[in-house]
Amino acid sequence: MISSDDYLVQWLVDTGLVDQSGVDAATAVAASERQGIGEAFVTAGVISAQAVAIARAGLCECSFVDLTHYDIDINHASLIPRSAAESLGIFTLFVIDGIATVGMIDPLNLQAVDQARAALKAEIEPVLCIPEQLQTLISKAYRLVSTSGTRHRKLDSVPDELVTDDEPIVAAVNQIIASALEDDASDVHVSPTEHEIQLRYRIDGHLQTRQGPPLSAHAALVQRLKVMAKLDLTQTRRPQDGKFRFDHNQQRCDVRLSTIPTVCGENVVMRLLRPHGAILDFEALGIPHEAVTSIHDILAHPHGMLLVTGPTGSGKTSTLYTAVKKLNTPDRNIVTIEDPVEIRMHGVRQVQTMADIGFTFAAALRSILRQDPDVILLGEVRDTETALISTQASLTGHLVLSTLHTNDAAGSIARLKDLGVPPFVINSALLGVMAQRLVRRLCKECAVPHTPDESLLARFGLTDAGEFKRGAGCAACGASGYRGRVGMYELFCLDKRSSELIEHGATTQELAAYLFPQSGPAPGSYGPMWSDGVKKARLGITSLEEIGRAVATVDLDTCTNETATSETAATLPRKEAA
């Protein structure tokens, strides 16, 4: 009698997925490891688990479902008892028009089909899933649904019970954070509403909704997080901030926790900081070669100041640490002042500010200057005292790297003046300023040619559609069309002409007109930022629509008005640029 394994082998051979040598290798593994032939093909490295599953689906004449990016619906987890789901390998994926789509390890298992039909009291459509994916999904789903059993517990007893890792609430919290790390999220939002807990992950700068636990579990979830962050469990009417460390898959993540009371309960936001994240090179960050050359020239100076500007979450810290990585040699003493320390680096002295005891950026900077530093990384220039001390430090033999919150590179000069730094000090201390934004990368799996809207083309002064692309959306990117992020940049390096403009009180627009005229950027500079974004869109790295959203707060009138602004700047005294 021909077995199902024999049919599977024949199917794979007939479709050309395996050859006789692959069959022999899998047969040997199956015999030695006591595995089924399908699992043996995967163990032997002949084909992937997905290919085996698709072949089995073809033999069973049913559909195959990839659960890699499946979003769990917690309501479906309560439709089939957990014991049955785990023993039979079944889980309800969708219920549409009275027909339940049930993921199964073996759609030909009639006992499983009958038990699913009896539990659901509906017609079912079996679909085949990869066993490991389905088992993981079942485990995650029932961890979340089990939190509803905590609704009758007294909150006073929750902290003591939460010490045990077997508790449902502990499992639910761990699952929420672990899933966020697996999805490469930067923030987790747990927001109570009148009817549900709204669980959202910020992925690639955009919030995406996930299925969360029931509303009845909210109080216990918040209590558990407060226990982890060592916050006051009895205080629910005031905002609280804390932090804790979370380990997942042998990787350590620092979590910053913030709670704030709302009319529906305490809202929780967690920032996920990966301390040992890989520090890339400038080119890998998306910085163009022309700008990288100028940055290397700036970092070669023994003293001076390099500023990186942009809004929160624009990748400024990553850019600065890439510079520190290049400078980090045994013959240099590098000290950082941050709040918090987001990236750990060997050989660098990293200092965490503590405002509650008066150890601010300015206080730390004064102390660090007595530590004989060669390079100082300052997390942010946020007040007059810090601005004056940092610029003075850059004039006394130290290379200072720091950040500012401005929309563009030219705007950093006005910001420094607002902080009380005189123009002559700016000209003496400042070496260059880089402004940046992060935009989403197009998913390589589903990027297709696309013609942008005419109004968007006109906004950037483009007369032809070029070779632009957009993301169609697929399973790999969660149907968003984007996967990962890349920066777009502008850089200006001070020269004689720009120093004169600063000395004579030129406006931000006048300085930008000199740095980034239509004829090309000033010597050593690169930009403007929107131009770098358009170049990346033409290369198919991102979409023009994404560039339009990212630079919504930047003055794009320079696309058409640069010439007029240049004429205004020309009325100022002018000397030859260096």
Image (cartoon, rainbow, N blue to C red):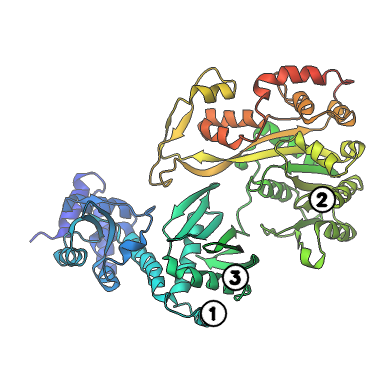
Say which mark, if any, is on residue 159: 1
**Disc 1 on helix, strand or loop?**
helix
Q: Is residue 368 above or below residue 488?
A: below
Spatial CA span between label 3 and label 2? 32 Å
Amino acid type at image mark 1: Pro
Q: Is residue 46 visible?
A: no
Considering depth in this image, is 446 or 173 the residue closer to the camera? Answer: 173
Instruction: Give the residue pinned by disc 2.
Output: 383
Amino acid type at image mark 2: Asp
Residue farthest left in this picture: 1
**Disc 2 on helix, strand or loop?**
loop
Residue 98 x/y as whole percent: 21, 54
Where the N terminus falls, by quadrant? bottom left
Quadrant in which residue 367 is drawn: bottom right
Q: Nearer the viewer, mark 3 or mark 2?
A: 3
Amino acid type at image mark 3: Thr
Q: Is residue 566 above or below residue 265?
A: above
Quadrant in which residue 272 is drawn: bottom right
Residue 210 x/y as whole percent: 44, 56
Residue contact between numbered discs 3 and 2, judged by CB atoms under 8 Å: no
Q: Is residue 72 above or below residue 18?
A: below
